[in-house]
Image: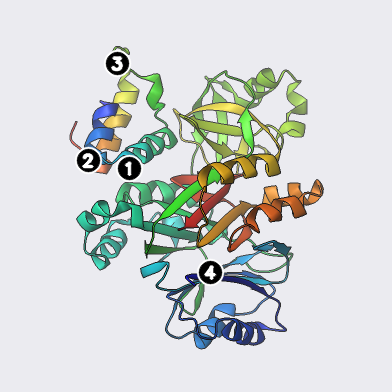
């Protein structure tokens, strides 16, 4: 879900992708801590959905 | 010449502006950026009168940098003509403590340059400068909102003041408190942004912020335990000694290879106040401060392998005081003397977020 937000928001621009990753860290999402096999954490998922909505991204 | 940088000590703001006019004879600045010691009264009005056809932005300062020099009681000026800045658009957001919605402001800025698509297609040419008046203490929320409203990269810092002087930001002939000045530059030859913080990871142990007050910049708990207790544990010291380590061992959000420093203020109301709020859920490391001159040289040499048109250095006031304390002013300034450059001692730095104890640097190619 995190990677979807970054990919959709960056639209292929590497500089923007990196800045979105950093912005998510600063919003309290430790991006690299989560992988596709990480167990779902409802609190983190809720926060990522809120960030996606702010960014205008559908997840 | 695309950029001129110079430092002026005037008898007053009018004298300073007259000297600036003389220094810029036969030069038509598109944008004039200045950092004025808070000793000067209304420098923005004097400069606007002297340069009626230029966009003018600036900040009050505790102390200034210009090329090889560190000064106080001066005005550092960078003048950029069409050789370096093709176009610039300035907006002021007032009352930033009220958490204004920035979408309309940024929509207007995007539109001025032909819309978001134009900016994305020429992303390497567009960059923003943000100057905060620091008394609102709302920079972290503002930068978060700014980063949501635009993909443009904004770099800058928060105003400071000398002694009893007033902290202000300036735009187009007016001064502001509790405001942010935003300027989007369409550069002629591109830009680079870098930040250097001379802070390194002290402990690999990750601490999660589980209780905090973001807006009031108070930290209460790491991993559901009192933050002071956990901080002392990481340092291996007694909890009643932790204040002695606040300056040398700040906190950092580590995002990949980048560190975003958060410095301590004081123990208060069962928590610790910071100079930048931390949202709950954030993972941090305890840091240790390194050598500012060595780390700055490394960062500059890696990021600027060319002769830039100009360099703008937003250098934390803590770092300035540390450089002064360590008698390192000359070697530090010599690093920036290699380029046409200006800077000032900031009360907070900005790049993607609000940062402490850092230098954020905009390089105009």
Dot 2 lies on which element?
loop
CA neighbours of label 1 inside 10 A, class few (<14), some (14 to 19), many (20+): many
Q: Quadrant of residue B85?
A: bottom left
Q: Nearer the viewer, mark 2 or mark 4?
A: 2
CA neighbours of label 2 inside 10 A, class few (<14), some (14 to 19), many (20+): few
Up-down: is B224 above or below A23? Answer: above
Closest to the observer, B175 or B84: B84
* Residue carrying label 1: A16
Dot 3 lies on which element?
loop
Q: How is the image coloured?
A: rainbow
Which chain is home to disc 4? B
* Residue carrying label 4: B58
Closest to the observer, B270 or B308: B308
| Image marks 1 and 2: residues in contact by CB distance under 8 Å | yes
State the separation of the CA atoms marked 4 and 1.
27 Å
Q: Residue B105: x percent and y percent? A: 31, 62
* Numbered badge on residue A40: 3
Q: Residue at x 53, y 45 (%)?
A: B195
| Image marks 3 and 4: residues in contact by CB distance under 8 Å | no
State the separation of the CA atoms marked 3 and 4.
47 Å
Q: Mark 3 or mark 1, which is nearer the start of the sequence?
A: 1
| Image marks 1 and 3: residues in contact by CB distance under 8 Å | no
Q: Is residue A54 left or right of residue B321?
A: left
Give a yes or no on whether discs 3 and 4 share a subunit.
no
Q: Residue A34: x percent and y percent? A: 36, 19
Which chain is home to disc 3? A
State the separation of the CA atoms marked 1 and 3.
26 Å
């Amino acid at each position: 879900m995190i990677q979807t937000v970054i990919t959709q928001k960056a639209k292929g621009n590497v500089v923007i992708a990196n800045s979105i990753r950093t912005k998510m860290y600063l919003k309290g999402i430790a991006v690299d801590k989560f992988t596709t096999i990480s167990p779902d954490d409802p609190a983190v998922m809720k926060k990522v959905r809120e960030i996606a909505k702010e960014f205008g991204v559908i997840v | 010449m695309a950029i001129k940088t110079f430092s002026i000590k005037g008898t007053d703001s009018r004298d300073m502006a007259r000297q600036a006019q003389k220094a810029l004879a036969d030069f038509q600045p598109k944008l004039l950026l200045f950092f004025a010691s808070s000793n000067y009264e209304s420098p923005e009005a004097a400069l606007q009168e002297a340069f009626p056809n230029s966009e003018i932005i600036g900040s009050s300062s505790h102390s200034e940098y210009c090329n090889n020099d560190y000064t106080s009681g001066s005005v550092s000026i960078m003048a950029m003509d069409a050789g370096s800045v093709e176009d610039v658009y300035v907006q002021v957001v007032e009352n930033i403590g009220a958490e204004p919605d920035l979408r309309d402001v940024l929509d207007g800025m995007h539109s001025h340059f032909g819309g978001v698509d134009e900016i994305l297609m020429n992303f390497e040419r567009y960059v923003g400068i943000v100057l905060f008046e620091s008394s609102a203490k709302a920079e972290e929320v503002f930068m978060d909102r700014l980063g949501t409203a635009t993909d443009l990269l904004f770099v800058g810092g928060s105003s400071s003041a000398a002694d009893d002087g007033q902290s202000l930001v300036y735009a187009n002939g007016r001064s502001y408190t509790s405001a942010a000045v935003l300027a989007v530059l369409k550069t002629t030859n591109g830009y680079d942004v870098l930040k250097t913080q001379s802070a390194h990871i002290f402990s690999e142990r990750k601490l999660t912020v589980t209780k905090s007050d973001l807006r009031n910049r108070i930290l209460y708990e790491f991993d559901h335990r009192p933050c002071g207790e956990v901080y002392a544990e990481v340092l291996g010291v007694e909890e009643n000694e932790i204040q002695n380590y606040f300056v040398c061992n700040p906190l950092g959000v580590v995002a990949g290879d980048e560190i975003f420093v958060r410095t301590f203020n004081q123990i208060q109301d069962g928590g610790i106040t910071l100079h930048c709020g931390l949202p709950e859920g954030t993972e941090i490391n305890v840091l240790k401060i390194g050598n500012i001159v060595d780390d700055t040289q490394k960062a500059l040499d890696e990021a600027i392998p060319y002769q830039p048109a100009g360099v703008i250095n937003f250098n934390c006031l803590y770092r300035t005081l540390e450089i002064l304390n360590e008698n390192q002013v000359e070697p530090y300034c010599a690093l920036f003397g290699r380029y046409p450059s200006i800077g000032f001692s900031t009360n907070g730095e900005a790049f993607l977020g609000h940062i402490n104890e850092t230098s954020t640097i905009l390089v105009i190619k």
